[in-house]
Image (spheres, rainbow, N blue to C red):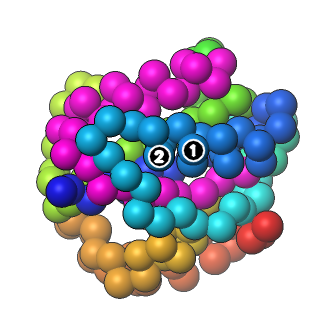
């Protein structure tokens, strides 16, 4: 089994219900099981500030799906939740980002691992630290070392 970390976020409709339902959708992925889920967090938007706050979380998956197949499954779940990609960092019904997959480093046109901005965002780091406090990020170091850098970003555990 491989370990994958997936970030979940939503800010349209009922974002809390969407993230909770997405946890259930992840639990139904083939060749996979949800090993752990973080708490939910309310966070301010990044980039486009004139949109509702987000509800974010992280799930830990144990899976035998290869990274690109897992990405395809995540994009399928997003589509089932009505995700329409209009603009980067815009509002969304559901966003699922593959953050890490074991210690694999990839730089493909459609998938970069580790996620290139995960160490810069409180809405990823805090839930990730909750489910994997001792995690090390390839070429970035310990997760704990990055937490002070995002301490000024608005995030509240729900």
Q: Residue at x 69, y 61 (%)?
A: 40
Task: Give me the C-alpha separation between circle 1 and circle 2.
Answer: 5 Å
Q: Relative to the observer, which residue lies in front, 4 or 54?
A: 4
Q: Residue at x 44, y 26 (%)?
A: 75
Q: Relative to the observer, which residue lies in front, 73 or 68?
A: 73
Looking at the rendering, the stretch of residues picked out in magenta corresponds to 55-83
In the image, is residue 157 above or below residue 8?
Answer: below
| Residue 25 in sight in this render | yes
Label 2: element kind:
helix
Q: Is residue 17 magenta?
A: no
| Residue 46 in sight in this render | no
| Residue 54 position within the rendered picture, expressed as x and y whole percent measured from the top left | 74, 47
In the image, is residue 59 above or below residue 39?
Answer: above
In the image, is residue 156 above or below residue 74?
Answer: below
In the image, is residue 153 above or below residue 109?
Answer: below
Q: Residue at x 79, y 67 (%)?
A: 158
| Residue 111 position within the rendered picture, expressed as x and y whole percent measured from the top left | 28, 34
What is the quadrant of the N terminus in the image?
bottom left
From the image, tell me which residue sits under label 2. 27
Query: CB atoms at circles 1 and 2 under 8 Å apart?
Result: yes
In the image, 30: left or right of 78?
Answer: left
From the image, tell me which residue sits under label 1. 24
Q: Is residue 61 magenta?
A: yes
């Amino acid at each position: 089994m491989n370990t994958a970390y997936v970030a979940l976020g939503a800010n349209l409709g009922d974002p809390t219900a969407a993230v909770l339902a997405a946890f259930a959708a992840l639990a139904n992925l083939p060749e996979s099981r949800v090993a752990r889920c973080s708490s939910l967090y309310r966070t301010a938007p990044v980039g486009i500030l004139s949109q509702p706050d987000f509800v974010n979380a992280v799930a830990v998956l144990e899976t035998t799906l290869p990274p690109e197949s897992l990405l395809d499954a995540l994009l399928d779940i997003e589509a089932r939740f009505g995700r329409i990609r209009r603009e980067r960092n815009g509002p969304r019904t559901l966003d699922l980002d593959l953050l890490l997959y074991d210690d694999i480093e990839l730089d493909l046109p459609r998938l970069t691992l580790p996620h290139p901005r995960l160490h810069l965002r409180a809405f990823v780091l805090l839930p990730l630290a909750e489910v994997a406090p001792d995690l090390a990020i390839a070429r970035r170091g310990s997760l704990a070392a990055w937490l002070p850098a995002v301490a000024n970003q608005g995030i509240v555990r729900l």
